Amino acid sequence: MTGSTHRHPWKKGFEIELMAPRGLSRRDLAERIAHRVGGRVKTVFYPQSEPSLVPGMPVFENLVLGFDILDADGQRLALCVDDLTLRDGLNPQAAPLPGWMRILSDDARLLALVTEHCDPGADIADVLAPVAALFGTDIEHTDGGIAKVVDRADRSIAMVAPLPGERERPCELITPPYEGDPGTALTALLADAKALGFTLPREAAIHVHFDARALCDAAILSRLVDALHRHGACLRDLVGTNPACVRLGPMADAIVERVRSEAFRGCDWEQARAMLAEAKPTKYADFNLLNIAHALPDKHTFEARIFPGSMDAADILRNARLMEAVLVWAVEAAEPAATDGAAWLATLPLSRDDRNDWAVGAGR
């Protein structure tokens, strides 16, 4: 395949992992961006999860403070949030900064309730008061500035604690989805980060979310998953996936087997989507099918998570174009992926410049 009938850039958004210098935080980056565009910063709750060592509780659910950057018309320019995988270089003994908090629960649904009813700008001592009122109880305060809410049967609802250990420094810079060329916008955002002394964490990655609408076809998704199963390692080697990244890895065999099956390929989309959801895809893989499987209305995306961290817009966009070429191939190809990785890469609809760049990269 030498060309593509996909005439417009694929709608996509970016997640760029950064680290603030000591003495600054992700709030500082949000405020600088807002000042540059004459906008404002809105403090929000942002959900995060982390593995748990508690038996029967695979993850802890968290809400952390995020900073939504809105332009003069109230449109989102970017969002600065924590990323709990970014840990290297932080001082775990550092005291919490005033006002910085995280809210924990063993049930993401309860944290959704917190998000709907609580004010992220409230003081840590009373931020959970609206939830306590919903359950007809009072906030319970304990040592260390910790406060919790239980229901009338003394079952835990949520707990808020000061945010220790320089956790204000990690910054995942999340962009809105871009319809056209995002080069100018990305360059400006990264220039703001560089001006404040932000750097790449040791674990840094770039995640790219692609609009999933064109992939909502059983045959197309089957072809894509088959190619990524065959050649995911080749793509990782080509882009130079950061070995310090965590929460990566190939898609589960059960998902691959189901999506590659004749039964899946013969389904209409809603049946295929249900089969995919039953296979329980996880976000934490090289390629995230979770949002497609559940047709999330605000995040109906295919996410590629293999790209190394970068503060260079040209590098980020070159990697995104490679993945976009893979998606276009999946939509347009008449045959399954070639078994040889190099032969398959040669069929991707890349520009001549990109093809030459990747040929040089593959030769290193």
Image (cartoon, grey):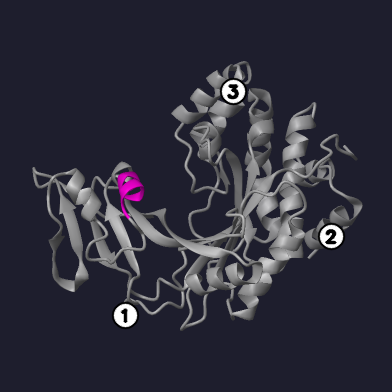
Magenta span of residues: 111-118
Q: Distance between the residues labelled 3 and 2?
A: 35 Å
The residue beneath circle 2 is 357
Nearer to the camera, 41 or 309: 41
Look at the numbered disc 1 and give the secondary structure of its residue: loop
Going from N to C along the chain, the mark reached first, 1 or 2, is 1
> Residue 92: x percent and y percent?
35, 76
Q: What residue type is labelled 2?
A: Asp
Q: Residue at x 47, y 75 (%)?
A: 25
Horizontally, is 179 left or right of 158 in the view? right
Of badges 3 and 1, nearer the viewer stands: 1
Is residue 139 shown above or below 33? Answer: above
Closest to the camera, between mark 1 and mark 2, is: 1
Location of residue 213 by image quarter: top right
Instruction: Say which residue label 1 marks.
Output: 93
Asked whether, in this view, residue 221 is left or right of residue 85, the answer is right
